[in-house]
Amino acid sequence: MKTKSNISSIKKHRFSFFANQLVNKRTLYFTLYTFNFKSVLLCGLFLFSINIIDGQSLNDLVNKALDNNPEIKKFELQYRIASEKVNEVNTLPNTEFGVGYFVSEPETRTGAQRFKVSAKQMLPWFGNITARENYASALADAKYEDIVIAKRKLIASVSQSYYTLYANTAKQDVLTENIKLLETYEILALTSVEVGKASAVDVLRLQMRQNEMQQLFGVLSQQFLAEQTNFNMLLNRDKAINVNVINELNLPSEDFEITTENLALHPELLKYDKLYYSVEQSELLNQKESSPMIGFGLDYINVENRPNMNFSDNGKDIIMPTVSVSIPIFNKTYKSQTKQNELQQKEVLAQKQYRLNTLETLLDKAINDRISSRISHKTQAKNLRQAKNAEDILIKSYETGTIDFNDVLDIQELQLKFQMNQIESVKTYYVQTTIINYLTQQ
């Protein structure tokens, strides 16, 4: 049997160990990171440049994604194809060649006609080719905005996935610390059972709580692997590559200024402006194509010598220059195209207004959600301080020889909830920031 002095010595040792664990647990707070904005390629989208502790720079990862992502390459190839069409339309209609043989040779004064060779080139009306080039260029410019939009979306997706991985890792760290803390509580409970101040049920409750945390830890680990696969696919690399995220991240002391006027210059809206312009160019081209076409040609007719006759033009071949005009007398096609262009312009304007309304709604929601995340973060910090005070009371109770392990579990559960919510609020803040950047940064 242990003596009373031995038990007292064990208590002091357990309390010292318990206090150290609490101190270690308290060091899990997030430190503040400075950040600055960096312009990223053609998008003009700004990202946070975060100081890294044993983690990979988000900016570097974003640049890798922009270089390797197949969707970006797809839009770049589509733009190159559209640009090449400018060369396609910068050409004249095909030159026509014809050869004819007279089966029944017509007799003329100078001789019988044997065969005929002709060539003809139609020329579009003045400015027609330029109109075609302008229309093709307008379509290519609209296609270019797809690249800008895709890059912006990719930056936002990579950033959001990165912050999701960070939140998952931070939650796993919190669970690890809480599991260690419960192990300390379990040691205290076993000691209390030995001296008759706690029951075996308290020990079992602590063990069951540890089991729940182990389960949650396992679930988070699997979620991390799934999100890691998503992240690696955005970078177009092997899904099994480990992603090392930052260890600590906190909210900035104040939010950066949001310029909502920039929303009108968003690439998704600029694309509609360029589509509208392409329809204008289409109508100009339609007007040019409704004009006449002029053709120039040359006919050569071979004439055979008349036998037994001698005069100056005997057997003289025929060369005949020709001029032709193609007039669209029945021009319902062009009138219909004009009406279609008018309707298409109205459609583009309606689509732009609808998209503008949608983007304004997304921006307003992101701003409000970011404000809410800051409020939540402050509330969780306050709750954690109060939970710490409750812990201090439990420690003092232990010093007097009494401790209610039901209260211990309640306080520990609350602390875990507050810590998880605090991490989630940090994640939400930065995810909403990426949305705001996507919508407003130039």
Image: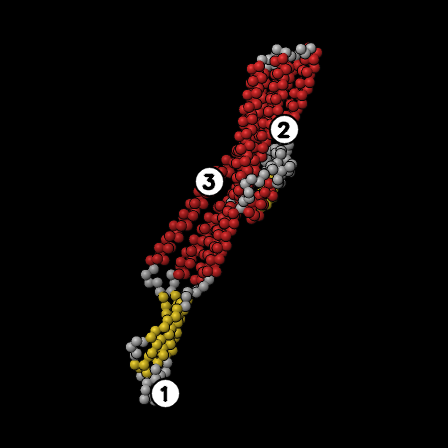
Q: Earlier in the sequence, mark 2 or mark 3?
A: 2
Circle 2 SS class: loop
User: Which label sits in the foreground, 3 or 1?
Assistant: 1
**Amino acid under disc 2:** Leu
The alpha-carbon separation of the residues under discs 2 and 3 comes to 40 Å
User: Which label sits in the foreground, 2 or 3?
Assistant: 2
**Residue at x-position 63% and y-position 18%:** 187
Q: Earlier in the sequence, mark 1 or mark 2?
A: 2
User: Which label sits in the foreground, 1 or 2?
Assistant: 2
Residue 413 appears in the rendering = no
Residue 143 versus residue 35 in the image, above or below? below
Which residue is under mark 1?
Answer: 312
Q: Position of residue 178 (x, y in %)?
A: 60, 25
The alpha-carbon separation of the residues under discs 1 and 2 comes to 114 Å
Q: Earlier in the sequence, mark 3 or mark 1?
A: 1
Instruction: Check disc 3: other Cα within 10 Å, few if <14, some if 14-19, many if 20+.
Output: few
Which of these two is toward me, 223 or 46?
223
Which residue is under mark 2?
Answer: 28
Which residue is under mark 3?
Answer: 358
